[in-house]
């Protein structure tokens, strides 16, 4: 019996690896390496290209309890994060309290660097699955990466030499409001701007360079970048109004590469708050009550005008109305989640827990709708700012949910072209005037479509090749 159990565990481990990494044939023809193409230009002085900042998407930064040092997100299995552990649930969930704005609800958890790899522990053996390691290493990104990934390796095909210092990784608490993360990005860019200017002076004797950054952002990281470009470090006002559109962040940025960004939202985000979040099919889900505490999860919702949620009579539901969620009993309004809420709010009665949960859900929905209005406010791009799109359009991707308004059960899932998480129309920010006349709300400099899934976009060789060409072979000289 013990041997059978071990075999099952090993099978699940291999299933997780196959799911997250994909299975590749061992008999692959040798391709020309990116190093053979870009090593020469990569060795040019960093003054001949813009500094680069990589922004990961949701789940893409390590989270650590600042008091205990325990990993809250970044390692799964025995000794790590697990949906089956009370401690993991209470650590990963954000605090809830009636009558208090979301930006004032803080815990002792903070980001602790980008999550280039996700570690699973199976039978005590750590198994590392590459998340952003491929693109980060290939771009030579990050302060510590210059020390650990310099030179040739399995992941890092391009050799930047010993003088490479202008690539950085921005980590953030992906649970929190996107406008909060954008304010932290503004602070981060100011710090890296000062650092890079100092390096220019010390290494090359260059004073007051005309310095701008290039940004490579994946998934939700692209929404953080877009909010920063438009509003700099302005938070979303507590009164529900919109911040002043100044394009303050664009003054520091030359080019932005958005990779699989849900510019018009992702219907999958609705399902993850409704049913819980599953990292891979063999693994248990994080309960919907935990995911429902995270404002950023709601900010990934599609727009109402795109009809992501439709009742059986054909009437579109108001996705951002608290009454919709209470009627369907989804997320924090799901009465079956009281067992989880009892762990998150242990000193409250059932009635108190439900009141706090519904209040928190209403605040998150309102904040998400407010963020969408801020991002969708029409405005031409400032002169000199380039927006480059990379998206997937070869995978069937959830677009619309047909729901029974009485039972809350999903009767049908409508799918369309995308990367398995974000539809093509969402990535390109397509909005329809009518059925015949769609238009893009973002004036893209160019658009590139790939035949791979959402996370695979950052590992796709065509993506890395094209980005390297734009960053290195076609540099913008400060």
Image (spheres, grey):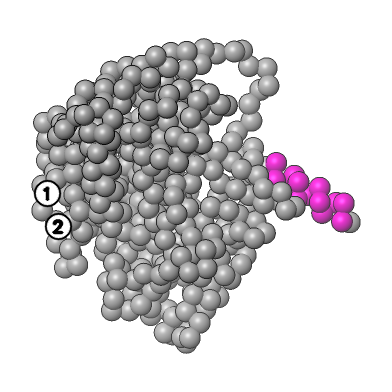
- The magenta-colored residue range is 2-14
Q: Nearer the viewer, residue 207 or 416?
A: 207
Report the side of 9 relative to 289 (left or right): right
Residue 392 position, x and y percent, is 41, 31
Residue that mark 1 sits on:
245
In the rendered view, tell whether residue 469 sits above or below residue 290: above
Residue 135 position, x and y percent, is 45, 32
Which of the image's four quarters has the N terminus? bottom right
Task: Give the residue displayed 26% in from the left and 22% down from the top.
Answer: 48
Q: Is residue 374 magenta?
A: no
Q: Which secondary structure is most common in the magenta stretch? A: helix
Task: Give the residue displayed 36% in from the left and 25% down from the top.
Answer: 467
Q: Is residue 209 visible?
A: yes
Residue that mark 2 sits on:
242
Task: Look at the numbered discs 1 and 2 and tell me whether their residues touch, using CB distance below 8 Å.
Answer: yes
> Which quadrant of the view contains residue 169?
top left
Dot 1 lies on which element? loop
In the rendered view, tell whether residue 267 sits above or below residue 239: above
Task: Give the residue displayed 64% in from the left and 30% down from the top.
Answer: 23
Measure the alpha-carbon separation of dots 1 and 2: 8 Å
């Amino acid at each position: 019996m013990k041997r059978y159990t071990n075999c099952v565990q090993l099978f699940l481990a291999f299933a997780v690896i196959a799911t997250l990494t994909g299975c590749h044939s061992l008999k692959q023809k040798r391709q020309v390496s990116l190093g053979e193409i870009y090593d020469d230009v990569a060795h040019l002085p960093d003054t001949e290209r813009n500094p680069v900042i990589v922004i990961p998407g949701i789940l893409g930064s390590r989270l650590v309890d600042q008091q205990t040092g325990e990993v809250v997100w970044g390692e799964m299995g025995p000794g790590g994060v697990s949906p089956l552990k009370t401690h993991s649930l209470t650590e990963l969930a954000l605090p809830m309290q009636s009558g208090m704005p979301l930006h004032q609800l803080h815990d002792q958890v903070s980001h602790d660097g980008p999550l280039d790899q996700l570690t699973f522990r199976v039978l005590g053996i750590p198994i590392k699955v590459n998340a952003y390691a491929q693109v980060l290493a290939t771009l030579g990104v990050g302060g510590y990466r210059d020390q650990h990934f310099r030179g040739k390796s399995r992941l890092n095909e391009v050799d930047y030499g010993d003088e490479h210092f202008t690539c950085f990784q921005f980590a953030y608490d992906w649970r929190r409001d996107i406008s909060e993360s954008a304010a932290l990005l503004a602070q981060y860019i100011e710090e890296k701007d000062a650092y890079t200017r100092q390096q220019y002076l010390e290494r090359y004797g260059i004073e007051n360079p005309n310095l701008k950054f290039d940004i490579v952002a994946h998934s939700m990281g692209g929404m953080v970048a877009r909010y920063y470009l438009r509003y700099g470090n302005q938070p979303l006002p507590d009164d529900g109004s919109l911040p002043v559109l100044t394009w303050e962040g664009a003054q520091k940025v030359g080019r932005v590469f958005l990779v699989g960004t849900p510019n018009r939202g992702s219907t999958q985000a609705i399902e993850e708050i409704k049913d819980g979040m599953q990292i891979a099919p063999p693994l248990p889900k994080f309960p919907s009550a935990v995911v429902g505490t995270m404002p950023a999860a709601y900010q990934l919702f599609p727009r109402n005008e795109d009809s992501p949620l439709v009742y059986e009579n054909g009437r579109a539901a108001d996705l951002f109305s608290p009454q919709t969620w209470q009627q369907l009993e989804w997320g924090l309004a799901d009465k079956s989640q009281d067992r989880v809420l009892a762990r998150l709010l242990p000193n409250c009665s059932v009635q108190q827990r439900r009141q706090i949960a519904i209040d928190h859900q209403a605040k998150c929905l309102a904040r998400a709708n407010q963020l969408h209005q801020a991002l969708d406010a029409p405005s031409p791009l400032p002169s000199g700012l380039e927006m480059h799109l990379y998206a997937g359009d070869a995978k069937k991707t959830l677009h619309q949910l047909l729901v029974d308004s009485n039972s809350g059960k999903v009767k049908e899932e409508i799918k369309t072209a995308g990367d398995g998480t974000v539809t093509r129309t969402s990535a390109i920010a397509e909005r329809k005037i009518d059925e015949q006349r769609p238009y893009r709300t973002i004036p893209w400099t160019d658009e590139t479509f790939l035949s791979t899934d959402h996370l695979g976009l950052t590992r796709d060789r065509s993506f890395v090749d094209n980005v390297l060409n734009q960053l290195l072979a076609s540099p913008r000289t400060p």
